[in-house]
Structure formats: structure tokens, C-alpha cells
Amino acid sequence: MKKTTLFLYTVILASASLLAACGQAAAVNPGSPTDVPASSPNSNPSAPTVTPVGANNPSSSGATSDSKYVDACVLLTKEDVSMALGVPVDSATSTGLGGVCTYTTADKSIEFTIAGHTGGKKAFATQLERLGDSALVIPGLGDQALFNTNSNALFLLKGDAEYMFNASDLNFQPLAQSVIQDIDTKVAEQLLKNLH
């Protein structure tokens, strides 16, 4: 049930990101629905400027200087996750217009989701209130962080952007919440280093 809930949450976030990106792209250039709009210089100064890999961006790195959208696998590389965990990361797979990156090690899977480039403060506050006692607040991590003890996902707020991390065992062996929280926290700490 917990994995199903997390999966549904991830699918909803990825779908919302896709719809928002398509809607904004259509508003900027109705004749080219796959174009990502350029951000204004002051729209989100803390967000790196990277475009997700797509039809108008054939490079595998996804790096460009004209977009506010970020490919999660570029923002947090498999080398970053390997360094954070101290184990080799075999692959990093980007989905959802680059908003989700899944890293795999020999026995673990870590999912990193850019839950929202903007509006994160409001979403985080709503989630904290909704979760109540199921939210374990993690002091000193980003601007705010919580571990959802129902879904075993860590949510991180930095500026007005919200990020989600969730580790699981590739062999479907249950992991203790403390183990998942430790893995998620290490990866989140690496992301914060990249954001500075």
C-alpha cells in the first residue's frame, strides 16, 4: 500500500509537471508545443538553467541557458549519488520531462523528484499540516525537510522549490525506515551542495 501511494503521488507530480510544461510552451509558441519557454532573469534566480532532454534538445546532458526547467538527472548526477552513498551507482534514468530521476545501485533504487520549481513553500506547508503526526520534521536540512513515515519519502524545501527522495530495495526486501531516511538524507545533502 505504501509503495502504491508513493507511486501514485510520483505519477501525479510527473503528470502535473508535463501538463504545466506543455501549457506554458503552447502559450509561448503555439506552433511548437515541445518548446520550453525561456525564463525571465528574475523568475527564479536560485534555479539552475537546464532544459529537459527532448525533441528540441537532442543533447544527452540537457544543459542549456534558456530554460527554468531542470532535468533531475543533470541537477543530481549518478556520480553525485554515488559519492553521497559511498557505493557505485549503475544507472540514472530520467522521466517526466526530466522531473524524476531514478538511480540504481547493486541492490537499491533511489528516486529523486523535482516536485515543483515554484510554489514549494505553500505545497510543503499544506503537506506538513495534512500529514500531522506522520510527518517527521528534519531540522537543519535545507530550508525545511520532513520524512513522511507513511510513504517513507523525504521532502525537502529549498527556496520555493520542493524535492522528494525515496529509497527502496530492488529485491523488494523491506528496509527499515531509519535506513531509508538515512539514504534519502545523504542524497538530499548532496543536492543541497549542488544548489549552492
Image (cartoon, rainbow, N blue to C red):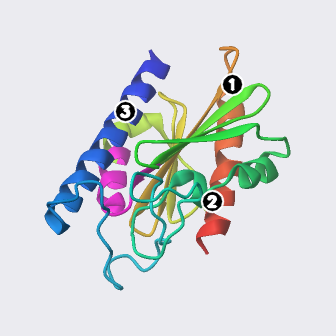
Q: CA distance from mark 2 to mark 1?
A: 23 Å
Residue at point 76%, 33% (across, down): 105
> What residue did someone put label 3 on?
11
Contact flag, marks 2 and 1 (Cβ < 8 Å): no
- Looking at the magenta stretch, what is its main secondary structure? helix
Q: Quadrant of residue 181?
A: top right
Q: Which residues lie in the magenta part?
A: 114-128
Label 2 and label 3: CA atoms lie apart by 22 Å
Q: Amino acid type of disc 2?
A: Leu
Q: Nearer the viewer, mark 2 or mark 3?
A: 3
Q: Which mark is residue 176?
A: 1
Q: Residue 139: tell me if it is visible.
A: no
SS under mark 3: helix
Name the foreground residue: 69 vs 113. 69
Name the kind of residue labelled 1 in the image: Ala
Mark 3 Cα shell of 10 Å, populated few (<14), some (14-19), many (≥20)? some
Quick one: quadrant of the C terminus? bottom right
Q: Relative to residue 6, is residue 138 depicted above or below?
A: below
Question: Vertically, is 77 above or below 45?
Answer: above
Mark 2 vs mark 1: in front: 2
Residue farthest to the bottom?
41
Q: Are dots 2 and 3 in contact, CB under 8 Å? A: no
Front one among 101 and 8: 101
Q: Which residue is label 2 attached to?
A: 191
Side of 80 relative to 72 (left or right): right
Q: Name the residue type under label 3.
A: Val
Helix, strand or loop at mark 1: loop
